[in-house]
Image (cartoon, rainbow, N blue to C red):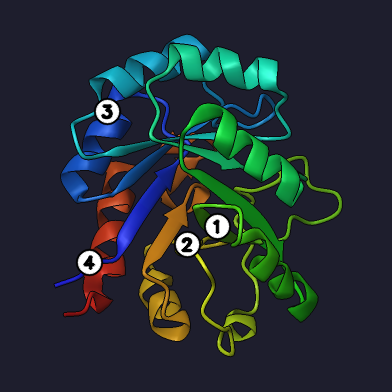
Amino acid sequence: MTKIRAKICGVKTPQDVSVCAKAGAAYVGFNFFAKSPRFVDISTAAQLAIGAPVGLAKVALVVNFDNHALDTITEAVPLDMLQLHGQETPERVAEVRARYGLPVMKVLGISTAEDVAKINLYSQVADQILVDAKAPKDADLPGGNGVSFDWDLLRAKKYWQCPWMLAGGLNPENVAEAVRATGVRQVDVASGVENAPGVKDADLIRAFVANAQMHSCF
């Protein structure tokens, strides 16, 4: 049976990591965007990554980081993937992928069919695409705003050249419907499993992963 793979983004404590692993999450995300309530510094991220169980993929969320900043993170934190959540061009995605030898997930904000069309371009240079809701114009954060988008935009999608993941306003109550409606095999959540900004709730994490996997298939 193929299980839906869940990513819990914005973990900040060893307890968060442990709960994610025991719940059956496939990925945990470390948020290096300083304005986010989920921000972790490099020292904390390194400790969390070192203590993570084998098999739990460790992802660094970064926003428009230059090579110096990425060098600092990748040298200190044992990572399995880089998540580019800024305005990185396809050329920049390819450059990061080549420079660090790590899989790269590019985040694309979606609100219109024109936004969806960009996935074809980025899927040629990224290892994965994270399809997220486009942040509101006045938002302080590029993601993690608890905002969803019209999943119908993905119903007529063509097969892209790399795996993709769905984010944007997901929570334990709607994740099963999101999987059913879009056919996605991977889902991402941050604020949807919190009881306060940046504070993960163990019960919500367990419920999110379990409900996502209700539509796992053979």
The residue carrying mark 3 is: 15
Q: Residue at x 52, y 28 (%)?
A: 100
Kindly report which numbered mark, 1 or 3, lies closer to the viewer in this rendering. Answer: 1
For label 2, the SS is strand
Q: Is residue 14 above or below residue 85?
A: above
SS class of the residue under badge 4?
Answer: loop
| Closer to us: 118 or 154 | 118
Count of numbered marks? 4
Q: Residues within 10 Å of mark 1 (few under 14, many from 20)?
A: many
Q: Answer with mark 2 or mark 4, whichever residue precedes in sequence.
A: 4
Rounded to the nearest angstrom, the CA distance separating label 2 from label 1 is 5 Å
* Residue for badge 1: 130
Residue 121 visible within the image: yes
Among numbered discs 4 and 1, the one appearing first in the sequence? 4
Q: Amino acid at mark 3?
A: Gln
2 or 1: tag closer to the N-terminus = 1
Q: CA distance from mark 4 to mark 3?
A: 24 Å
What is the crowding at mark 3: few (fewer than 14 residues within 10 Å), some, or many (at least 20)? few
- Disc 2 marks which residue? 165
Q: Which mark is residue 67?
A: none
Q: Is residue 159 above or below residue 41?
A: below
In-front residue for pair 191/178: 178
Q: Indicate the amino acid at tag 1.
A: Leu
